[in-house]
Image (spheres, rainbow, N blue to C red):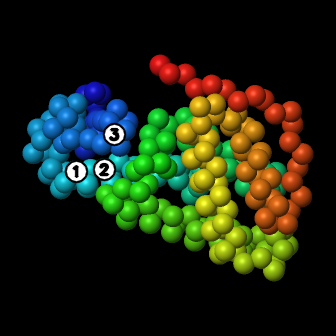
Amino acid sequence: MDANLGTRERLLSAAQAELIEGHGHLEMQAVARRAQVSVGLAYHHFGSKAGLIAAVVEGFYEQLDAAAFGGAKLSATDWADREKARIGAYVAFHYDHPFAPLVIGPLSRAPEVLDVETAFTGRQLAAGARMLEAAQRDGIVPGGIDPHLAIALMIGGIRQALIGALMSERRPDPARLTGDIWAFMAAALGLPAKPLSARPRATRRSRS
């Protein structure tokens, strides 16, 4: 455990590690031991085990937001390229983060994180609808599409695609997955999907 981290950060890091090792379960004593603090201090910062788990998931979503949404710096030449780049950043973040399979899998159904999940999804839906409305005003997306319904369907579809990819024995290449998701989105929005380049084979996950 990095001694330079503050107590709260050490607890969050320790809790994430315990959740990964415990396949979505943790004990406060184990978290405190890993963070090298007292159990009482863990309760002081988070109130309960549920509060600690919720804080870990909230931290994950804050990192995701910085990587692919509000805080992301996406290089693109036009609206379509930017949104495809956003999908690429979204996929890459989930592929690279060891906590992602738990967050979008078992933990997404846990009562401890319901409020966090609801808040993050609400922010995604609102921001996505605003993005589509702006694209409609600019003549990029057809005006007959309901932006709120469209973004809800797209977010749900992307999430299910990621769940399938992350849980697969052979994960699809992230560039291929990004291209497939963008093709789905472009079709849903009535946009021309750019042809995909040669698709690499799926790669088997290591079992280290």
Viewer-side residue, 100 vs 68 = 100
User: Mark 3 packing: few (<14 Cα in 10 Å), some, or many (20+)?
Assistant: many
Q: Secondary structure at mark 3?
A: helix
Give the quarter of the image for residue 93.
top right
Q: Position of residue 173 (x, y in %)?
A: 70, 33
Q: Is residue 12 above or below residue 36?
A: below
As shown in the figure, which amino acid type bears the numbered disc 3?
Answer: Leu
Residue that carries the numbered disc 1 in the rendered image: 49
Picture quarter containing residue 70?
bottom right
Tell me the number on the disc at residue 53.
2
Left of 9 or right of it: where is 153?
right
Q: How far apart, in angstroms, are the residues tagged by discs 1 and 3?
A: 11 Å
Which residue type does callout 2 highlight? Ile
Q: Is residue 68 left or right of residue 178?
A: left
Q: Are marks 2 and 3 in contact (CB under 8 Å)?
A: yes
Q: Residue at x 73, y 37 (%)?
A: 175
Q: Does residue 62 appear in this view?
A: no
Callout 2 secondary element: helix
Mark found first going from the N terminus, 2 or 3 = 3
Instruction: Pick the quarter of the image with the N terminus.
Output: top left
Q: Amino acid at mark 1?
A: Lys
Percent x, y for residue 111?
Answer: 33, 60
Residue 171 in the image: above or below residue 130: above
Residue 39: percent from left, percent from top: 12, 41
In percent of the image, x 82 and y 70: which residue is there? Answer: 141
Marks 2 and 1, how far apart at CA: 6 Å
- Asked whether disc 2 touches disc 1, contact meaning CB atoms under 8 Å apart, the reply is yes
Seen at 31% across and 50% down, the residue is 53
Find disc 3 in the rendering and name its residue: 19
Image height check: is 106 above or below 2? below
How far apart are the two marked residues, 2 and 3, measured between alpha carbons? Answer: 8 Å
